[in-house]
Amino acid sequence: MFEQILDNVRQRAPLIHCITNYITTNDCANIVLACGASPTMAEAEQEAADIASVAGAVDINIGNLNTMTVRAMHRAIAAANQAGVPVVLDPVGAGASAYRMDTLREFFSAYQFAVVRGNVSELLAVGGAASNTKGVDAGAADAVTEENLEERVAFFKQLSASLGAVVSVSGAIDIIASPERAYICRNGHPMMSRVTGTGCMLSALTAAFCGANHDQILEAAAAATAVMGVAGDIARKKTEEMGGGTGTFRVCLMDAVSLMDAQTLQGGMNIEIR
Amino acid sequence: MFEQILDNVRQRAPLIHCITNYITTNDCANIVLACGASPTMAEAEQEAADIASVAGAVDINIGNLNTMTVRAMHRAIAAANQAGVPVVLDPVGAGASAYRMDTLREFFSAYQFAVVRGNVSELLAVGGAASNTKGVDAGAADAVTEENLEERVAFFKQLSASLGAVVSVSGAIDIIASPERAYICRNGHPMMSRVTGTGCMLSALTAAFCGANHDQILEAAAAATAVMGVAGDIARKKTEEMGGGTGTFRVCLMDAVSLMDAQTLQGGMNIEIR
Amino acid sequence: MFEQILDNVRQRAPLIHCITNYITTNDCANIVLACGASPTMAEAEQEAADIASVAGAVDINIGNLNTMTVRAMHRAIAAANQAGVPVVLDPVGAGASAYRMDTLREFFSAYQFAVVRGNVSELLAVGGAASNTKGVDAGAADAVTEENLEERVAFFKQLSASLGAVVSVSGAIDIIASPERAYICRNGHPMMSRVTGTGCMLSALTAAFCGANHDQILEAAAAATAVMGVAGDIARKKTEEMGGGTGTFRVCLMDAVSLMDAQTLQGGMNIEIR
């Protein structure tokens, strides 16, 4: 599973246009490079449409909005929709402020997204359910568990149908859902939430995988999640061996994505379809 | 000393709202996570008040001001003051430009800060004394030394009284002063000044410690400085063992903060009270 | 060769004013520190002139323009030109959008640059030749090869004459050209292009070297390129030994620049003059 998806990213090396936030943009660019794609982070409204329309995919991340970047996002998404370029949306901190929710509402009413990817609190907020976001982190009460998994899967399949987009939810248990089908992924480690931007990086990685696999968006999104999860497992093991902390873990995570091959992915991933 | 302070950060995991600069914001977010707190770096004026008012503490860093971030800072500080949320101010590069001094004057005339933390040149400039800042780095002539320590301690105690805020000054010898009492800390290594953002990181760490210890601001600020200094000592030792340079040192510094426990802190810190 | 150049950077520790992009600014600041100089990344138009006019050199990087930073760049370059401070220009993504080309045209018509440094696609675009930029990466078809080297050297010598600036072109084979003389450098490794910002870092390093060597701009630019190339070779070797990927490589690259001495540089560099 996913060999072809992974191979397409390396072979096609798509240009990925990210308009993201200045906190994690360096990590996003580096993870796009690590998986074999080519990032461009241009966010001037003067050039956003030019660049988005020739990209393999566009990654929009609302982690740190301001008036100027919002304008650039509108231009980039509109141009991408026009040109048939898939757009991944990361609704960072949805529910944390009215400004973010208003911006998201504008986006959903005007544009089409290929994937909406975030943590469970963010996706619950996007879906209009009660959520308990803590700044940009998921609230503990919202977590996907073995107990509520069935219910959550149903909720996100429905959300996928209503958004017309694949819904990719990360946490201890990841759910990547289309209206009919969901991948459930159980890789990764809590240490990933002690490094800033692992969610943003996964969105950029998802865009890279979608950019090289336009006709398999659900599988591309699931493969990106699996790669990140397995990379997290590898990084955790290596960090422990080295006696390192979160600094070392962050370096090892990038290493593991850059060194990932089909065999490592197959051997490491814990994924099922529902 | 400081066991309870450290434990409170881990147990309470406060939300820390940082409006800082885009050069070091990733490191600031990562160090807040490393110590066990939860960062949010939102700087849109549209949401700054919403987020600051529910935070455990606010960290304001003037390392790279622009018209938009200054507006967001005003909203965040005002909201924090209103809600009783402690605000840490890092007057980066005070004295380097009229724009920075004007912004600081506006802040001090309108708001209340819990801690003002910077290098010695910055704090001398804030205190209206002659200073020799070199861009954002302290001038050598301003350094706190064993010879001028007594005099510097008296100056910063007085500055603390006039600002109504704890004054936290970092360098080879650190001084953390209230009007009546000062902690003197002699940890850390010159290599820390060869990695950008170690000062910004210490301010974010100070905010995290204050956010979990609202009623012990002086001790929280001193504990944050001690943690950073001991982490610097550990990172230096590890970097030497590995034959590394400033890149490795930076990774090891983050590791050491994320792995810090009360025993390591007690064993490593060199602190006195005057 | 270059011992004195390197030594001057360490001894004089010039203040380097970088107005760059938020994607790689942290790496730029860290590499300026790693080589022994002192970075300041201020980009507010209110202070850009104040800071540029007292700097050792100014580094202007158009990797992520917006209306505000462009205004700050104009002020900084004008002030630097007035004060005789050398300015390094990195025309990131020249050719990728009309906005970038228009901004460059304004810069070249109004100001004087000491060095224009970029990848081959960017410099071809600056020189008015056909180019094949891929976002911010050089197009494969544009690469400098042993076959087209003679022709490329002639082109960039001529471009240097017409711009009145040293032209520094990086890739598998680097060319650093004045109208009469060019250094050809064959250090470095393709892995450098799998870490974001290595080009931006080289521009910042070039500014640091020029800032400490005002009267030898061509040699300073060539030395900066040689240091970066040799550091890339060392980092590649160390990364392989450690079984690391792009995350480890990035750390080792910074290490190698911070640990670089004249002997290592002499022993490692592969440079000729044409």
Image (cartoon, coloured by chain):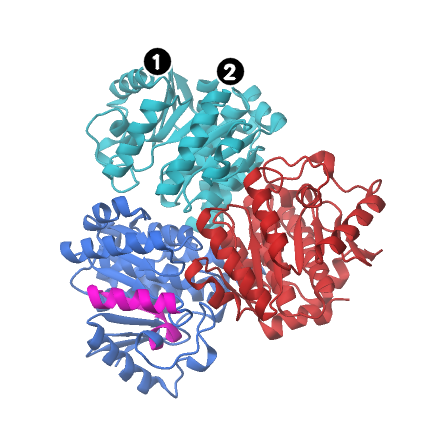
Chain colours: A cyan, B blue, C red
Which residue in the structure is indicated by mark 2? A215
| The magenta stretch spans residue B103 | yes
Report the amino acid beneath label 2.
Answer: Asp
Q: Is residue A25 visible?
A: yes
Callout 2: 10 Å neighbours few (<14), some, many (20+)?
Answer: few
Q: Residue B184 shows which numbered tag?
A: none
Q: Position of residue A226 (x, y in %)?
A: 45, 27
Q: Is residue A115 left or right of residue C11?
A: left
Quadrant in the picture for the C terminus of chain A: top left
Residues at discs 2 and 1 both on one chain: yes
Q: Is residue C37 left or right of residue B103?
A: right
Q: Quadrant of residue C13?
A: bottom right
* Residue A245, placed above or below residue A73: below
* Residue B14, placed above or below residue C14: above
Precedes in sequence: disc 2 or disc 1: 1
Q: Quadrant of residue B211?
A: bottom left
Q: Position of residue A13 (x, y in %)?
A: 60, 29
- Subunit ID for the residue under disc 1: A
Q: Secondary structure at mark 1?
A: loop
Q: Position of residue C97 (x, y in %)?
A: 57, 37
Relative to the observer, which residue lies in front, B186 or A165? A165
Q: Is residue A264 left or right of residue B180?
A: right
Q: Residue shown at 35%/77% (left/top)?
A: B124
Most common secondary structure along the magenta stretch: helix
Q: Position of residue C205 (x, y in %)?
A: 61, 59
> Which residues make up the magenta segment?
B98-124
Which residue in the structure is indicated by mark 1? A179
Q: Quadrant of residue C180?
A: bottom right
Q: Secondary structure at mark 2?
A: loop
Q: Is residue A191 visible?
A: no
